[in-house]
Image: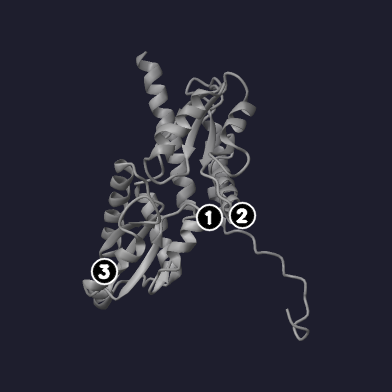
Amino acid sequence: MTASNPPRDEPPAPLDSTAHLMNSISSQVTGRLRLISPSGRRRPAPPALVLVGHGSRDPRALVTVRALMDRVRELRPALPVHLGHIELNEPLLPDTLAALGDDTAAVLVPLLLTRGYHVKRDIPEMAAAAPVRARVAAPLGPHPLLVETLYTRLLEAGWPPAADAATRRTGGVVLASAGSRDPDSATDTRRTARLLADRLGVPVIPAYASAAAPTVDTAVRALTARGRHRVAIASCFTAPGRFATECARQAPWIASDPLGAHEAMARLVLHRYDQTQALTEADLASA
């Protein structure tokens, strides 16, 4: 701030709209009603929700994941929400699970976007070694709420909200993801790309930062060869990090921010939690 613009007290923030306030109250009431059965008896406490982040050396990643955790808590105030990482950041997942105590029920929701080694092996093995009774949810993608976040981030980066004929004719998107050697991971990414293409009305090519082909640069060149000269990079990463930064640098036009703490991502986390909890209850009912 320059000397000609001295600091001044900020005006008080405006109150939230009535609709937002009522939505907040409704969410809190709904969260408490979940604890009461139709007979009026108090239900057992819900399983804890444990967000499972990958971990990153980029300090922005931890800030982003914690912001997403706060969003989840706002949407479901009565639900105990915790965080654990596979590597690189604290708390590590085994430490988080150990701190929950013996015989605690928990649903682990991976903040990962496809099936792969971490979802299939690492997280289940950490859960099995912990004292808690844990179920592992599906990864966040593919899902329409994930596509909703990708679409919003592209709009924020400069993608036209109403695609005209020129955009449909010359536009294209590279869906940049981390990559995995697991074929199921590539299947999930391709599915997300198809859903995003349907939403945008232009071709979307999945590409990868590592471990899989094509690379982002190859995908950009493939779209350009097809006459698609307005190519955007859609960042299919949960949080900022090295891969997201490297992919964004290859954008010939615009690049969206990572998914981050968008409200649709918080809703998707809770959807995976509820989905897993419903399956658990169905298993118990049929036992």
Mark with earlier residue (3, 2): 2
Residue 258 shows in this picture: no
Three-letter code, disc 2:
Pro
Q: Residue at x 34, y 46 (%)?
A: 142
Q: Which numbered tag is attached to residue 59?
A: 2
Where is residue 133 shown, x and y percent of the image? 51, 22
Three-letter code, disc 3:
Leu
Q: Give the Cα distance between marks 3 and 2.
A: 33 Å
Q: How many marks?
A: 3
User: Within the image, what quadrant is residue 81 found in?
Assistant: top right
Three-letter code, disc 1:
Ala
Does residue 287 lie above or below 168 as drawn? above
Q: Which residue is tagged 1?
A: 19
User: Within the image, what quadrant is residue 87 found in?
Assistant: top right
Question: In this view of the protein, which residue sits in the foreground, 201 or 55?
Answer: 55
Mark with earlier residue (1, 3): 1
Side of 283 where 86 appears, left or right: right
Q: Secondary structure at mark 2?
A: helix
Does residue 98 lie above or below 195 as drawn? above
Mark with earlier residue (2, 1): 1
Q: Residue at x 37, y 20 (%)?
A: 283
Q: Secondary structure at mark 1?
A: helix
Which of the image's four quarters has the N terminus? bottom right
**Colouring scheme, one of rainbow, by chain, secondary structure, one colour:** one colour
Q: Secondary structure at mark 3?
A: helix
Q: Residue at x 32, y 52 (%)?
A: 192
Q: Single out the residue that lies furthest toward the top.
A: 287
Question: In this view of the protein, which residue sits in the foreground, 104 or 172?
Answer: 172
Where is residue 223 shown, x and y percent of the image? 26, 69
Q: Which residue is tagged 3?
A: 223
Q: Give the Cα distance between marks 2 and 1.
A: 35 Å
